[in-house]
Image (cartoon, rainbow, N blue to C red):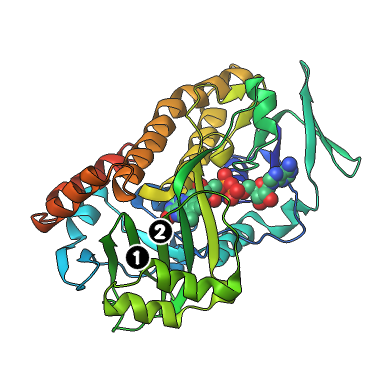
Amino acid sequence: MKAIIIGAGIGGLSAAIALRRFGIETAVFEAVKEIKPVGAAISIWPNGVKCLNLLGMKEPLRALGGTMNSMAYYDFQHGHPLTRFSLDPLVAACGERPYPVARAELQAMLLATCGPEQVQFGKRVARVEQDDQGVTAWFEDGSEARGDLLIACDGTHSVVRKYVLGRTVERRYAGYVNWNGLVQIDESLAPPQQWSTFVGEGKRVSLMPVAGNRFYFFFDVPLPAGLAEDRNTLRDDLKRYFHGWAEPVQRLIEQIDPQTTNRVEIHDIDPFAQLVKGRVALLGDAAHSTTPDIGQGGCAAMEDAVVLANVLQAHSLGIEDALLRYQQQRADRVKDLVLKARKRCDVTHAREMATTRQWYEELKSETGERIISGMCDTILGGPLA
Ligand code: FAD
């Protein structure tokens, strides 16, 4: 059996690794000549970590992951802790640690595990077609590839999605802009082994440890879409948005490098139930684009890869039957993740300020139990619970 995989992001590479482990031949086609991940880092929660462990990356992942032992929310003006708690109960309940990792390093680990020779770069798929025997993908350079099945991991702007659904879906602007990057760990910003978040005014500033003595940082600000982006004014823009915020936030704004700080307007897509058409399956952001508010988009792509490989290996009634089983096992799970993230997004980013103020109040009496219980629900809903 040969699978054509479109896209060499987290989803495509995880899928290639997973399928090859079961002896399925794969050929990965990636549009760009060199992958430049859109964000600086990503938190891989235990559901994603377990998928990567299963795919043979236990040790390299541990080496890339930051040590995140606790979690805290701080009042935006004074920097006082609203709540602070250990993540040990989450680790115990889920049977694995969370690992925040730098994206470029995650991408390199996946590529090394997959085998760089498996990936053909500079191959942008233009259209796909299938018949009773297989699937053909045509690329913009005029070349084509043929396989028994095709896994579309071509991201949130997927071109194969339209082929599968028979319609175009619009991305939905979630109402906020996210700036993210990496800085050296500095204890005057936040404790080094903690996920620390300053909240107020519907905005947030967050710091998470990754390997190499670095913090992954991000700033979220509710803003209209389409504002001009200028690295030369980035520091001043952040100073303006976070005027009056606590000292560590001001220090962080001074320490970031505007040239390597990413700016992303956050979008998602209304969940849809159809993930496959015959021999073609959608995987990762092509199948479910979510806001990053529960840190699950990449983890869900890893789950997709594991489930897909499993159904192809475990069932012998043909490719179309196996892909339908993949859809059955994934559609509700990914819908749940997208909608949970959207709900969290709205509370965090003041879609209704009264609800957000109520959340700030609740944080003052939070022991960690409620937050950890919510996170465990999400994590343990995955295929390797
Ligand atoms: P992508 O990473 O977008 O990869 C798609 C690949 O397909 C790209 O390499 C692209 O070049 C290629 N491609 C596109 N079109 C074509 C074509 N026509 N032909 C061939 N190739 C093509 N997730 C988490 O789990 N935890 C987090 O903490 C987290 N934080 C996030 C923070 C931010 C700010 C954002 C924006 C997202 C975050 N996510 C997080 C989500 C995560 O980044 C995505 O869910 C994940 O990258 C999806 O992987 P993918 O492989 O499906 O898509």
Name the N-terminal-most of marks 1 and 2: 1
Residue 350 numbered tag: none
Image: 95 above or below 191 = above
Image check: 149 left or right of 253?
Answer: right
**Numbered disc in front, either 1 or 2:** 2
Judging by the rendered image, the residue that carries numbered circle 1 is: 206
Name the residue at the right extreme: 142
Residue 220 numbered tag: 2
In which quadrant of the rendered image does the N terminus lie?
top right
Name the residue at the left extreme: 365
Q: Residue placed at 70% from the left, 25% from the top?
A: 163
User: Which amino acid type corresponds to the residue marked 2 in the rendered image?
Assistant: Asp
Q: Residues within 10 Å of mark 2 (few under 14, many from 20)?
A: many
State the residue in front, 173 or 287. 173
Mark 2 element type: strand
Point out residue 84 in the picture as x, y percentages from the top left corner: 16, 64
Image check: 126 left or right of 38?
Answer: right
User: Which amino acid type corresponds to the residue marked 1 in the rendered image?
Assistant: Ser
Instruction: Evaluate if marks 1 and 2 touch, with contact meaning CB atoms under 8 Å apart.
Output: yes
Image check: 23 left or right of 39?
Answer: right
State the residue in front, 311 or 376. 376
Point out residue 104 in the picture as x, y percentages from the top left corner: 57, 65
Mark 1 element type: strand
State the residue in front, 190 or 200. 200
Q: Residue placed at 21% from the left, 60% from the top?
A: 87
Point out residue 148 in the picture as x, y percentages from the top left corner: 73, 28
Q: Quadrant of residue 382?
A: top left
Q: Residues within 10 Å of mark 1 (few under 14, many from 20)?
A: many
Image: 271 above or below 102 = above
Image: 380 above or below 251 = above
Residue 151 appears anywhere in the view: yes
Residue 55 appears anywhere in the view: no
